[in-house]
Image: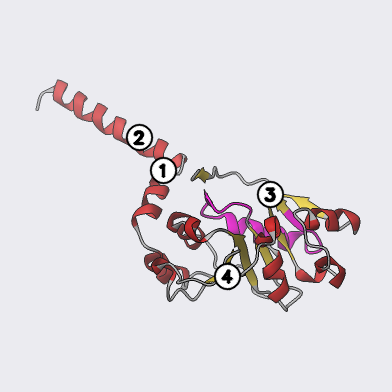
Amino acid sequence: MKQSTWIIISLVISLFSLIYIFTTYYGINRYLTLYVYSPDSYFKEYSKLTHGDEKNRIVISMASEYDRINKVVINSLLDQTVRVDRILINIPEDEQEIPKFLKNQYFIKVNFLGKDYGKANKYLPTLMVEKDGNSKVIILDRDDVVYGKDFIQELVETSNKHKNSIIKEGENMVLKSKYFKPSFYEKINDHMLTDYIAKHKIPVEEMKYGEKYTKMG
């Protein structure tokens, strides 16, 4: 084979390697995989993962709308390095048929509220039903973001390091229901959580997460 041919082959291989490195770094490869596969595929592997906390229950809480529940976002929460006990998706609508890709998913529950709590949809219904005061409730701010593969593990580990603090990463949080007295639930509005935290001076620890998110919209 001619030397020029080897040079061309080497350049092509190098180009594809650079493309692969680039797409991997910016999460494009993972995004495409999350888009192609169904939650069923991820569910099988998810059930085999180590639980994120040996001592306490972990619940992910997020809000969405029925026609906004996104398979790619759900897959990103299943494509993690640790598992949680339940992923609650709070929907401010009357009960409807659960989307096909979420049926028979033990770890995921679509919670039809029948009423709208505004921004509090993200956390209020979950805190109301989560009886164990030591459970870690991970509040996700967005329903249109592909979350990093180790995002949940990072949140849990940071929470374990700062056991008496609320963990805040952007607008995402980790907290425990034991932080909130009955008075918290009396006046429901969009700022009830931040107002309560400030009023009662609950410690907040900021966490910086390195992996880039992929925004859906």
Kind of residue indicated by mark 2: Ile
Return the mark for residue 179.
Answer: none
Return the mark for residue 112.
Answer: 4
Pick the front one: 116 or 8: 116
Query: In the rendered structure, which disc, 3 or 4, sits on the residue that comes first in sequence?
Result: 4
Mark in the foreground, 1 or 3: 3
Discs 3, 4 touching: Cβ within 8 Å: no
Q: Which secondary structure, mark 4?
A: strand
Kind of residue indicated by mark 4: Phe
Q: Which residues are magenta?
A: 141-167
Measured as percent of width and height from the top left, residue 2 is found at 10, 23
**Quarter of the rendering containing residue 202:** bottom right
Residue positioned 55% across, 55% down in the render: 150
Return the mark for residue 28.
Answer: 1
Measured as percent of width and height from the top left, residue 34 is found at 40, 54
Q: CA distance from mark 3 to mark 4?
A: 23 Å
Query: In the rendered structure, which disc, 4 or 2, sits on the residue that comes first in sequence?
Result: 2
Q: Residues within 10 Å of mark 2 (few under 14, many from 20)?
A: few
What residue does disc 2 label? 19
Q: Which secondary structure, mark 3?
A: loop
Q: Residues within 10 Å of mark 3 (few under 14, many from 20)?
A: few
